Image (cartoon, rainbow, N blue to C red):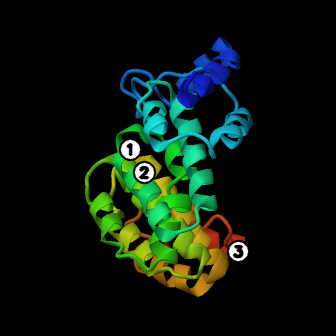
């Protein structure tokens, strides 16, 4: 039995139809939803991570591609957990680059917010930062007009932010300021909040000149940790 087949069999043993129905609604995989067409088995994330940890050393990228091409959400999510584990333990830059290349070739299957958030900072973001790579890929993704690629661009900067590097995050957030989807509003607001945890003044200065034109959700996410009085002033347009 192939590694991919063994993983699918293990996941299949854990499937729960009632949870799958809940996940379908939660991830808006119904007609007209942002996750339209996705299929679910109803498997908890810790169980997927456990399976990923037991297979990441032995599964090849070719077999991992089989999982990434699956119509089932949990197959793709487990594959991404495996890829994160592989990247974390890879030694040479060349080996890590191959994993990043695989990730970028798999973007079609990274098509919901949980798939993006659990992978982009830890593969693409980390690689660009640690190896001082050109970050133009993030601007291309941000300007693609495709929701999930844009969220990948935003979430990849999470790794930069944790290192105190805010410039690209702020530029990408600024470019998406007038985006029409709340999943981008939430992601950009979240990254601003993370910047504020490290450097309050940088976040405050960015918000001060833009908060009146920001989507309300983005602003609320960004100022969530602010002093209540300051938060109130932002919400009332009195800054």
What distance separates the C-alpha of mark 2 from that of mark 3?
39 Å
In which quadrant of the rendered view does residue 48 lie?
Answer: top right
In which quadrant of the rendered view does residue 36 lie?
Answer: top left
Name the residue furthest top: 17
In screen coordinates, is 174 left or right of 225? left
Cβ atoms at labels 1 and 2 below 8 Å apart: yes
What distance separates the C-alpha of mark 1 from that of mark 2?
5 Å
Query: Which element is circle 2 on?
Result: helix
Cβ atoms at labels 1 and 3 below 8 Å apart: no
Cβ atoms at labels 2 and 3 below 8 Å apart: no
Q: Residues within 10 Å of mark 3 (few under 14, many from 20)?
A: few
Q: Which residue is mark 2?
A: 103
Q: Which residue is mark 1?
A: 106
- Please provide percent x and percent y for residue 16: 68, 16
Query: Which element is circle 1 on?
Result: loop
Closer to us: 200 or 78: 78
Closer to us: 42 or 147: 42
The residue located at (37%, 66%) in the rendering is 213
Classify 84 as above or below 13. below
Q: Earlier in the sequence, mark 1 or mark 3?
A: 1
Residue 208 — which label? Answer: none
Q: Which residue is mark 3?
A: 227
What distance separates the C-alpha of mark 1 from that of mark 3?
41 Å
- Please provide percent x and percent y for residue 83: 55, 49
Q: Earlier in the sequence, mark 2 or mark 3?
A: 2
Q: Residues within 10 Å of mark 1 (few under 14, many from 20)?
A: some
Please identify, in this view, whether the residue under mark 2 or under mark 3 is nearer the observer. 2
In the rendered image, is residue 233 in sight? no
- Please provide percent x and percent y for residue 160: 53, 74
């Amino acid at each position: 039995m192939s590694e991919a087949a063994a993983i699918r069999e293990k996941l299949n043993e854990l499937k729960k139809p009632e949870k799958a129905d809940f996940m379908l609604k939660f991830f808006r995989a119904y007609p007209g939803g942002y996750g339209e067409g996705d299929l679910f088995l109803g498997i908890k994330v810790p169980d997927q991570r456990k399976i990923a940890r037991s297979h990441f050393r032995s599964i090849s990228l070719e077999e991992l591609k089989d999982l990434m091409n699956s119509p089932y959400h949990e197959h793709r999510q487990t594959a991404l957990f495996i890829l994160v584990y592989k990247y974390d333990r890879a030694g040479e830059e060349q080996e890590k680059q191959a994993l990043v290349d695989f990730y970028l070739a798999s973007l079609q299957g990274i098509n919901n917010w949980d798939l993006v958030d659990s992978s982009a900072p830890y593969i693409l973001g980390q690689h660009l930062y640690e190896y001082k790579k050109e970050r133009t890929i993030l601007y291309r993704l941000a300007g693609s007009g495709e929701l999930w690629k844009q969220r990948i661009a935003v979430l990849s900067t999470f790794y930069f932010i944790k290192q105190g590097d805010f410039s690209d995050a702020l530029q990408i957030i600024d470019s998406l300021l007038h985006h029409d989807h709340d999943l981008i509003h939430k992601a950009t607001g979240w990254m601003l909040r993370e910047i504020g945890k490290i450097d309050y003044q940088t976040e405050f200065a960015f918000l001060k000149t833009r908060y009146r034109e920001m989507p309300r959700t983005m602003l609320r996410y960004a100022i969530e940790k602010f002093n209540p009085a300051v938060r109130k002033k932002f919400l009332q347009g009195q800054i």
